[in-house]
Amino acid sequence: MNVAVFDTHKFDRVALEQANAGKHQLRFLEARLSEHTAELARGCDVACCFANDHGDAKTLQILKSVGVRLIALRSAGFNHVDIKSAATLGLTVVRVPEYSPYSVAEHAVALLMCLNRKIHKAYNRIHELNFSLDGLMGFDVHGKTVGIVGTGRIGQVFGKIMNGFGCRILAFDKTPDLQWAKKVDAEYVSLEFLLRDSDIISLHIPLSAQTKHIIDSAALAGMKKTAILINTGRGALIETTALTQALKSHSIGGACLDVYEEEEGIFFSDLSGPGIDDDVLARLITFPNVLMTSHQAFFTFEALKNIADTAISSISTFEINGDLSAVKVI
């Protein structure tokens, strides 16, 4: 099959070519998918899209008109695709529901430990021959209360790791997994209780109309003033302006962020020359108690391999007979 791979990066290309092994014709495109670039998929059966591509109704209509029949997402999240419009147009949409929960969960822990123990600051100081410990004090994670919002695969792995640190685990999920909770001695509670009692709060839920800005000014006001907030899920789970205000007023201990709600056009790009025009992001990264990475949590060898393998497998299954019962159709 002919596959238009949008928003291609070097790491994508290598992983996809290895997984493909000559099965399909891959057309690698640097452009992100949108109504302005969808025409680039003309002559292709499949549009393979990344997390920041746009699959709105108009874009999908163009893809359909140029011959696309399958939308293969290189992501677990699918909030960037209009699923109802895809169904109306007869377009099948598949995703990668599980690539490596360890990659994201471990990155969340790495962000927490780096911010807490000021590793990033110490690293810079040492290279300037400053061996002072002033301002580098952290806290023992052992014995702290950790709140996990969303206990799917990633949230569960994160919980297991934090249980290993000797933490008390609180959890919130619309479908509690009591068997997992028993293994890690976690307690399911209301979101309000979790926010109020937790020293560390980590978000591991998908983005939807119901979860957008689940962490808003009211939620932030309900947290401990010393709480550390971690987001390796989707940027819009947090209302950024509310977080910025909480940081300015010193009503939150800090934030570890791998995602940002306006990250499109910024993350995955080198803007060290031109700089950024986003004043909110520019202000956010100036806070000494904010540690940010650019949507890097998924970025391990194992995760990339799983993403590529799953995407190519779904495309191959679709090519054979259009029966996608064995893959994750949305």
Image (cartoon, rainbow, N blue to C red):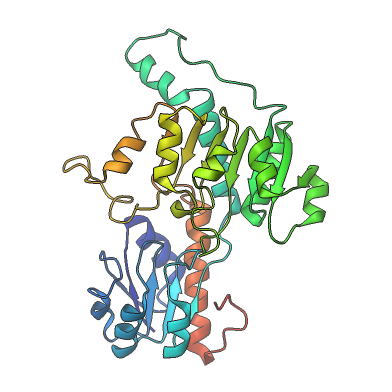
* Apparent side of residue 67 relative to residue 16 in the rendered image (left or right): left
Where 310 sits versus 267, above or below? below
Please name whichever residue, 130 or 171, is drawn nearer the observer in this view of the structure: 171
Residue at the spot 60% in from the left edge and 40% down from the top edge? 201
Observer able to see residue 288: yes
Observer able to see residue 107: no
Residue at the spot 48% in from the left edge and 37% down from the top edge? 256
Q: Quadrant of residue 276?
A: top left
Residue at the spot 26% in from the left edge and 64% down from the top edge? 30
| Residue 245, horizontal then vertical, whole percent | 41, 36
Q: Quadrant of the N terminus?
A: bottom left
Where 140 sits versus 20, above or below? above
| Residue 69, horizontal then vertical, whole percent | 41, 87
Where 282 sits versus 175, above or below? above
* Apparent side of residue 49 relative to residue 277 in the rendered image (left or right): right
Please name whichever residue, 10 or 262, is drawn nearer the observer in this view of the structure: 262
| Residue 329, horizontal then vertical, whole percent | 56, 78
* Apparent side of residue 211 relative to residue 88 in the rendered image (left or right): right
